[in-house]
């Protein structure tokens, strides 16, 4: 019994020591910010967003579990090679809905873990009522009261046969028709289902408040466009990613056709043909830049945000990354080890967990990722660990010092 007690005491002492060492390093970092080579933003410091902004401008997800989510999904065809790693990846995604369900659970959990909002109103656009019931079931395992989910059927315009083609991925296109499918909403914040929150999600609503008089949507960079061959039309400094969009739907309804997607279709086809909705949107915004507010990668951080072509993002260091995006299946295959390690750590997150312990675990996994050869996009991004863990470090420090902190 004495041995067990001593072992328990030793374990607690070790954990306490690790937490205090990490907090000390955090304090040093806060006063000596390293330069994050992936990032300066022209947006500046983010003010605190109070209350529950999603009650008036909801969060929107698009979820499909129908025939289009098959093993022939474009993600499986993207850079697939006959290697052991890709074979493991193929096995992992055999159950497309299983993967999507895990992502949704982690999205909901991280949203509530970091938020100060008491309740979240979320509109879920789905291909069927059965799919919505699946999403409801997932959310009920996270919180029965703080997540208020509403259903909206997937809407696409008639007489547009190209939208049913496999390469256009109809379910993904639905996010460009939110002005038409949600006629009673003035503004929304849309996110893909393959994202996790690393800070208060309500801060995204600051982007809606930041839109200028002519601007109708806010998006973050997608530097992959600088490496694509053949080169494709892109908007913003290096291209834009549609995984997070802050949308003023009232202004979008003033476009030709009554919405963003309809305006894109009326503008005509681009050359080369779009691979997906993101290509079409980039082409349209390159011709209509007055509609766009380009924000930093803090609001939608991708593995490509670490490319040398990516715009700098000083607020990733000063304020932390708010949204991490597992684009191109990077939450399930090794596109970048730090992105993968962050997601895998957060899949086991539970509401109420001590952020000090979560911080230690995540920092350990990120440190292990640094031991691998520097062949991944974010391997040489100085300060990325700090940017990924800043909100956790703030929460851990607040608990250690008995200060008011985020709702955990």
Image (cartoon, grey):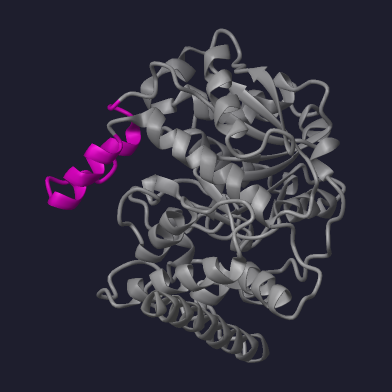
Quadrant the N terminus occupies: bottom left
Q: Is residue 142 magenta?
A: no
For the magenta stretch, what is the residue range?
A: 71-93
Identify which residue is drawn at 67% across, 91% down: 31
Identify whether 312 is placed above or below 213: below
Q: In the picture shown, does residue 29 fall above or below 188?
A: below
Quarter of the image where one finds residue 44? bottom right
State whether residue 329 appears in this view: yes
Q: Residue at x 66, y 44 (%)?
A: 245
**Is residue 316 among the parts visible in the rendering?**
no
Q: Toward which corner of the image does residue 49 lie, by quadrant?
A: bottom right
Instruction: Tally the marks.
Output: 0
Position of residue 150 measured from the top left corner of the image (x, y, whole percent)? 71, 24
Q: Is residue 76 magenta?
A: yes
**Front-most of residues 48 and 282:** 48
Q: In the figure, is residue 242 to the left or right of 376?
A: right
Q: Nearer the viewer, residue 271 or 255?
A: 255
Q: Position of residue 94 (x, y in %)?
A: 27, 32
Q: How far across and how far down the image is residue 89, in percent?
A: 25, 44
């Amino acid at each position: 019994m004495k041995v067990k007690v001593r072992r328990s005491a030793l374990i607690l002492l070790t954990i306490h020591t690790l937490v205090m060492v990490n907090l000390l390093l955090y304090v040093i970092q806060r006063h000596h910010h390293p330069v994050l080579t992936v990032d300066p933003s022209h947006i500046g410091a983010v003010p605190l967003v109070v209350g529950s902004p999603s009650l008036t401008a909801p969060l929107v997800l698009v979820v499909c579990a129908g025939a289009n989510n098959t093993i022939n999904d474009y993600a499986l065809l993207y850079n697939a090679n006959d290697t052991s790693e890709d074979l493991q990846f193929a096995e992992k995604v055999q159950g497309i809905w299983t993967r999507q369900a895990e992502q949704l659970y982690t999205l909901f959990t991280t949203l509530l873990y970091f938020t100060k909002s008491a309740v979240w109103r979320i509109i879920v656009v789905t291909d069927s009522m059965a799919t919505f019931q699946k999403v409801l079931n997932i959310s009920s395992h996270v919180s029965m009261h703080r997540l208020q989910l509403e259903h909206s059927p997937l809407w696409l315009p008639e007489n547009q046969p190209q939208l049913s083609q496999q390469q256009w991925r109809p379910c993904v296109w639905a996010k460009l028709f939110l002005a038409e499918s949600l006629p009673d909403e003035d503004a929304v914040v849309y996110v893909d289902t393959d994202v996790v929150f690393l800070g208060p999600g309500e801060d995204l609503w600051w982007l809606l408040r930041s839109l200028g008089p002519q601007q109708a949507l806010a998006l973050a960079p997608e530097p992959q466009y600088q490496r694509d061959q053949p080169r494709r039309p892109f908007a913003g400094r290096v291209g834009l990613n549609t995984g997070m969009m802050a949308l003023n739907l009232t202004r979008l309804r003033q476009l030709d056709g009554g919405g963003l997607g309809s305006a894109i279709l009326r503008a005509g086809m681009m050359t080369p043909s779009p691979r997906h909705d993101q290509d079409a949107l980039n082409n349209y915004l390159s011709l209509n830049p007055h509609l766009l507010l380009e924000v930093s990668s803090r609001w939608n951080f991708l593995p490509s945000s670490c490319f040398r072509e990516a715009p700098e993002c000083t607020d990733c260091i000063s304020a932390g990354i708010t949204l991490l995006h597992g684009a191109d299946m990077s939450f399930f295959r090794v596109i970048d080890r730090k992105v993968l390690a962050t997601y895998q750590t957060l899949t086991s997150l539970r509401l109420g967990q001590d952020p000090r312990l979560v911080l230690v675990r995540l920092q350990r996994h990120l440190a292990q990722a640094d031991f691998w050869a520097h062949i991944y996009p974010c391997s040489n991004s100085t300060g990325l660990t700090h940017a990924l863990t800043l909100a956790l470090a703030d929460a851990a420090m607040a608990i250690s010092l008995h200060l008011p902190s985020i709702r955990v």
